[in-house]
Amino acid sequence: MRKLLYVLLVSVVMVFGLTFVFKNQQMVTLDYYGAHSWGFSWEVQLSLLIITTFIVGLLVGYLFSTYSNLRLRGKLMSANRKLKNLDT
């Protein structure tokens, strides 16, 4: 049952993604710090730009949460060691 629900959810997301891409095919230009002198300019489909921005945001959020989680695990291990030293 859980696998069927997972397949259904993935299918719905895929259909939504495909219809999003087909409805947003217009080209946009992304200029960063002005493309005339030393800046960056990228001409891309709107849907690709939005999806790329979403994926980059997910990756950055994942990296920050992983860093925070690792730091907290280190503090927990240190506290456990101190507690074990107090018991003995």
Image (cartoon, rainbow, N blue to C red):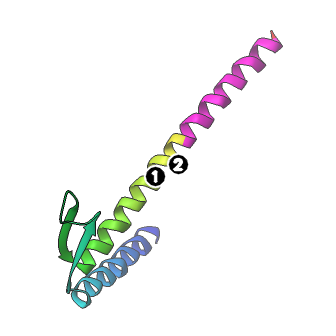
Report x, y in % for residue 11. Answer: 33, 78
Kindly indicate the quadrant of the structure image that contains residue 36. Answer: bottom left
Report x, y in % for residue 12. Answer: 36, 81
Q: Residue at the location (20% across, 56% down)?
A: 38
What residue range appears in magenta?
68-87
Q: Which mark is residue 65?
A: 2
Tell me the element at label 1. helix
Residue that numbered label 1 is attached to: 62
- Give the residue at the far front of this rendering: 37
User: Would you call the spot at circle 1 few (<14 residues within 10 Å), some (14-19), or many (20 or more)?
Assistant: few
Kindly indicate the quadrant of the structure image that contains residue 42. Answer: bottom left
Residue 77 forms part of the magenta stretch? yes
Residue 53 forms part of the magenta stretch? no
Contact? badges 1 and 2 (CB < 8 Å): yes
User: Would you call the spot at circle 2 few (<14 residues within 10 Å), some (14-19), or many (20 or more)?
Assistant: few
* Depth order, front residue of 56/73: 56
Q: Does residue 87 appear to the left or right of 73 in the view shown?
A: right
